[in-house]
Image (tube, rainbow, N blue to C red):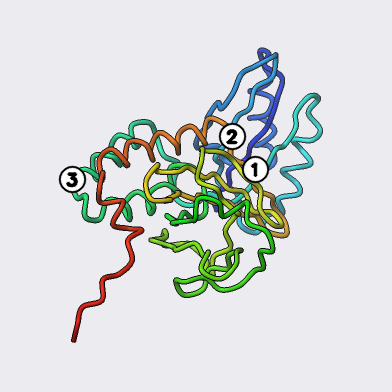
Amino acid sequence: MLLRVRVTLPDRPGALGQVARTLGVAGADIVQVVVLERLGGRAVDDFTVVWPGAARVERLLAGLAAIPGVQVDGIWRAIGAPVAGGHDAELLAQVAANPADGLATLVDAVPGLLAAEWAAAVVVPADWAARTGAVPRPGLTGGPVLPGPPGAEATVACTSWRAPDPLRLPEVTPLRARAMNGPGDARYAVAPFGRAGLVLVVARTGDDEMQAAGFHVTEVDRVAQLVRAAAVILGDRLDLVAAPPVAYPS
């Protein structure tokens, strides 16, 4: 199985090689390394590795923990093969080529670009997260559990193919792109389209053995850039996502 392993390590010669050797000794086959940050003598790197399905992840974690100065920020299952550069532009070209399905195309592709589990485009009230007296209850679109008083539900416009049913979403006010932590081990990145309360939500979750890392600032910026570009391409079509259905006389 594919795993994504995020580590913070000293930004000095040999540190990256030591982590790579430890992964190899533990039984992991490295297929991609992405440097997310280098600042103040520290680096944050993502490793995508092939890991034997029958092996315990604790062995991998123990090996990394034994390296001086190395901290494991998260480890989670990667969905599909790692994505190389240039795919953002390719995705936006697909959105532009077929704008009628542009939003669904974006939502379905984003998890693969960000080693996430699922994504959803959601229309939320502007003050949703600020409302008081919120209680969990079913939403409008077949099962997402959302907060808010009657009439304040978020509406799910579309989801990626691995999205759970029902959804559990963070309490989003669509003002700016940011990372959020949800209940349990859920990790989110959210970015507003700037139209009609439409927000893209991208999620990672772990399990009993692994805990996913939160979205790094570079990943949040990437989501925001994709959303801004898609909003320009799709334009007024996004307003139709939030429009109530038209009732025609029978």
Label 3 or label 1, whichever comes before in sequence order: 3
Q: CA distance from mark 3 to mark 1?
A: 34 Å
Foreground residue among 150 and 167: 150
> Is disc 2 placed on a helix, strand or loop?
loop
* Numbered badge on residue 97: 3
| Mark 3: amino acid | Ala
Callout 3 touching callout 2 (CB < 8 Å): no
Foreground residue among 138 and 247: 247
* Residue 195 versus residue 161 in the image, above or below: above
Q: Which residue is depicted at the point 33% across and 56% down?
A: 104
* Residue 7 versus residue 240 in the image, above or below: above
User: x, y percentage for residue 95?
Assistant: 25, 45
* Numbered badge on residue 213: 1
Quarter of the image holding residue 8? top right
Callout 1 touching callout 2 (CB < 8 Å): yes
Q: Which residue is depicted at the point 65% across and 59% down?
A: 54
Foreground residue among 156 and 94: 156
Report the residue marked by disc 2. Answer: 216
Q: Which residue is depicted at the point 51% across and 68% down?
A: 151
* Residue 9 versus residue 216 in the image, above or below: above
Q: Is residue 73 left or right of residue 217?
A: right
> Is disc 3 placed on a helix, strand or loop?
helix
Q: CA distance from mark 1 to mark 2?
A: 8 Å
Q: Which residue is depicted at the point 53% across and 49% down?
A: 78
User: x, y percentage for residue 218?
Assistant: 53, 30
| Mark 1: amino acid | Ala
User: x, y percentage for residue 116?
Assistant: 52, 49
Q: Is residue 73 left or right of residue 115?
A: right
Q: Is residue 88 left or right of residue 56?
A: left
Callout 3 touching callout 1 (CB < 8 Å): no
| Mark 2: amino acid | His
> Is disc 1 placed on a helix, strand or loop?
loop
